[in-house]
Amino acid sequence: MKTGAIITLSALALASGLSACTPAESQRAFAPVYEGIETSLLDGDLVQFDVEMRGARDAADVEDYAECAAAQYALIRGYGFARHLRTNVYEEGGLWRGDAVYTISAALPRGLKTIDAEVVALACAENGIPMV
């Protein structure tokens, strides 16, 4: 029984140590500033999106911004889907840049990284992420 008590006390000590962190200390506020999107048609249905933003938490925020651009672009062109090919993300001096390439298509393309442009565009609007 003493072993169980030691484990319980250790768990309580660990939990109390973790709860000492305030939300501000454990996670900074997310206040993105979207700097812009440049779109380049590479070939037929192949499109490149260059995005810039400040205040990103990590590369995923930049990737989301590029995905929103791709979704809206597909809809503007009369297509319903896009397939992600690649995204390069880098940060310098607080400015995050993303270079993403997508194919756009009317029908659901093959592949694992496909997006339904209408669904993604709605989610982007709800989350306040600008689009093309």
Image (cartoon, grey):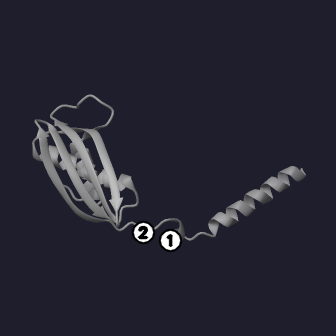
In the displayed structure image, the side of residue 114 where residue 42 appears, left or right: left
Report crowding for label 2: few under 14, some 14 to 19, many 20 or more residues within 10 A (C-alpha).
few
In the displayed structure image, the side of residue 19 where residue 27 appears, left or right: left
Up/down of 64 relative to 117, above or below: below
Q: Is residue 132 at least partly visible in the picture?
A: no
Q: Amino acid at mark 2?
A: Ala
In the displayed structure image, the side of residue 2 where residue 44 appears, left or right: left
x and y percentages locating residue 4 in the rendered image: 84, 51
Most extreme residue toward the front is 92
Q: Nearer the viewer, residue 39 or 3?
A: 39
Q: Which mark is residue 9?
A: none
Could you tell me which residue is drawn at 32 percent across and 55 percent down?
Answer: 62
User: Could you tell me if the residues under marks 2 and 1 are in contact, i.e. CB atoms within 8 Å?
Assistant: yes
Could you tell me which residue is drawn at 11 percent across and 47 percent down?
Answer: 76
Q: Give the quadrant of residue 5.
A: bottom right
Q: Which residue is mark 2?
A: 29
Q: Give the quadrant of residue 56.
A: bottom left
Q: Secondary structure at mark 1?
A: helix
Q: Which residue is mark 1?
A: 24
Q: Nearer the viewer, residue 87 or 93?
A: 93
x and y percentages locating residue 14 in the rendered image: 71, 60
Up/down of 45 relative to 62, above or below: above
